[in-house]
Amino acid sequence: MTKISDRIAQLRKQNGWSQTELAKKIGASREAIGKYERNEALPSVETAKKIADAFSVTVDYLVDETARPTFDKLTVRRLQDIEALAPEDRGHLMALMDAFLRDAKTKKAYAS
């Protein structure tokens, strides 16, 4: 089971950041980051949001042990923009994406 402490450490290491670097990015102390990673303290909601923003993940991903990082924030914003399109424009975009994905899958199949 993944805890928020494990997620923070995992994401920090994936980004190649030290505890001090993460602390600077969110306006916290290195000691606080260490406590979060050792599960000695839990970040406040505001701090959890800052941590999530620093890693470009959702707060959900940080706190929900079953959450998967399926979509980063940029992808979520793009999906929201697509939902806001007129139905005809959304249909055109989906057709373009379908064609691109079909071609990518075909290339992958032939490369194997």
Image (cartoon, grey):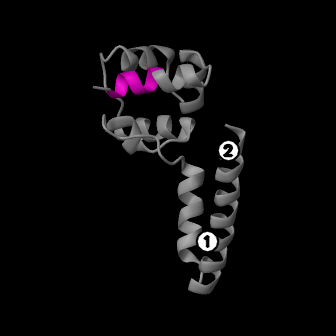
Give the crowd class for mark 1: few <14, some 14-19, many >=20 residues within 10 Å. few
Residue 6 drawn in magenta: yes
Amino acid type of the residue that numbered disc 2 sits on in the rendered structure: Lys
Residue 47 appears in which quarter of the rendering?
top left
At x 58%, y 70%, the residue is 82
* Horizontal arrangement in the rendering, residue 55 relative to residue 111 (left or right): left
Query: Can you see residue 23?
Result: no
Instruction: Give me the residue at 41% from left, 43% from top.
Output: 59
Determine contact: label 2, label 1, CB under 8 Å. no
Depth order, front residue of 100/35: 100
Label ID, residue 108 = 2
Viewer-proximal residue among 101 and 70: 101
Query: Which circle's residue, 2 or 1, is located before the other in the chain?
Result: 1
Q: Position of residue 40 (x, y in %)?
A: 30, 16
Task: Determine whether, in the image, residue 58 is placed left or right of residue 22.
Answer: left
Q: Which residue is mark 1?
A: 94
Secondary structure state at the residue bearing disc 1: helix
Residue positioned 63% across, 65% down in the render: 98
**Are there few (<14), some (14-19), or many (20+) residues within 10 Å of tag 2?**
few
Task: Identify the amino acid type marked 1.
Answer: Met
Q: Which residues are magenta?
A: 3-9
Vertical relation: 47 (above or below) 12: below
Q: Residue 15: give x, y in percent of width and height.
A: 60, 25
